[in-house]
Amino acid sequence: MKVLFIGGTGIISSACSQLAIERGIDLYVLNRGQTLRPLPPNVTVILADARQEESFYKAMKNNSFDVVVDWIAFTPAHIELDYFILAGRLKQFIFISSASAYQTPPARLPVSEKTPLENPFWAYSREKIACENKLMQLYRENGFPVTIVRPSHTYDRTMLPCRGGWTTIYRMRRNNKVVIHGDGTSLWTLTHHKDFAKGFVGLLGNERAIGEAFHITSDEWLTWNQIYETLAEAAGTRVQPVYVPSTIINDYNPDIGAGLLGDKMHSMIFDNTKIKSFVSGFECSIPFKHGAREIIAWYDQDVSRQIIDDSYNQMTELLIARFQRRT
């Protein structure tokens, strides 16, 4: 099977690239050659800019693929260019959407693929919804063979899932208090990228998946308190939380707040029945306790990775001064 990844070196896609090669897939990766994650051996690299029409066309004009996956499409304009360049050159097109496109807050849990797509809080999610709508229109009207995949919060060893990244671990190890949004009791789903890859690679070339949408997530549900406690344990310390409403965090930093209001402040757990019915034997097997140890070990291996975000640190101090009297 000949497969093209547009992107292919990000947190999620890097594990999918590795597993695809291990399973004997003839993998091509199209990117601009700017990545911190090396590709596995035997990948054919196509240097081009998929968001620039001339560059993309030149790269594709003499190529065709069984499957093309666009990991880096974020707007309907990206989808329109994909269709313009790729129509007739593939048997399956996989669009990487986002589980944040689901109804927020969800009317009922767990979320399934039948949950409506509606997120009034986050522009990123609304753009993903618009991309999905465009692709399904192309599927219905023109037969464009699309499959939609909606990752949720998927991580690798380089990505701390807590606000502030390493700054939060740094504060924990110095016995400083840290901010947790809300009261820390909302439920969340974290998926290791190697687990995600097992479900995703099973969709490549899967004819039954044409015209379908899937999320691929762990079945482990954790509160944000448990997530921070697990990270603290892995870092050999403890967490001292100060709870701050997400709306207040948004007032201090709208960039952080958008992801809270549009995603992480709401409980979000998933029914994975559909992906399991399409990919035989799929199961997530890496608990976050293991993933947390992997993350902390990676940061501790090289202190240059332990970057302190001064602006986040300052915001944390301001929020703690305002709210710690209430805890």
Image (cartoon, grey):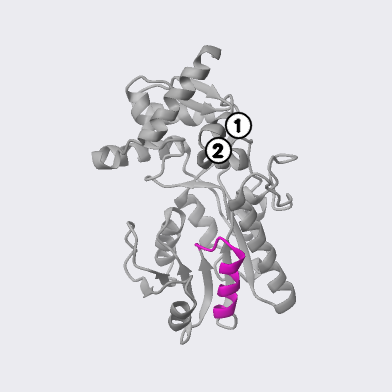
Q: Which residue lies furthest to the bottom in this view?
A: 62
Residue 82 is one of the magenta-drawn residues = yes
Assign the C terminus to one quadrant of the image.
top right
Residue 267, quarter of the rendered image: top right
**Residue ID at (40%, 21%):** 238
Amino acid at the residue labelled 2: Gly
Residue 326 visible here: yes
Q: Nearer the viewer, residue 155 or 141?
A: 141
Q: Main secondary structure of the magenta part?
A: helix
Q: Nearer the viewer, residue 206 or 95?
A: 95
Q: x and y percent of residue 158 in the render? A: 37, 45
Badge 1 density bin: few <14, some 14–19, many ≥20, Cα 10 Å: some
Q: Which of marks 1 and 2 is nearer the N terminus?
A: 1
Query: Position of 311 compared to 133: left or right?
Result: left
Residue 181, quarter of the rendered image: top right
- Mark-to-mark CA distance, 1 and 2: 7 Å
Q: Which residue lies furthest to the top in this view?
A: 325
Which residue does the numbered mark 2 point to in the structure image?
257
Q: Which residues make up the magenta segment?
A: 71-86
**Residue ID at (70%, 46%):** 103
Which residue does the numbered mark 1 point to in the structure image?
247
Q: Which of 287 and 231 is in front in this view?
A: 231
Amino acid at the residue labelled 1: Thr
Q: Do the residues labelled 1 and 2 touch (CB within 8 Å)?
A: yes
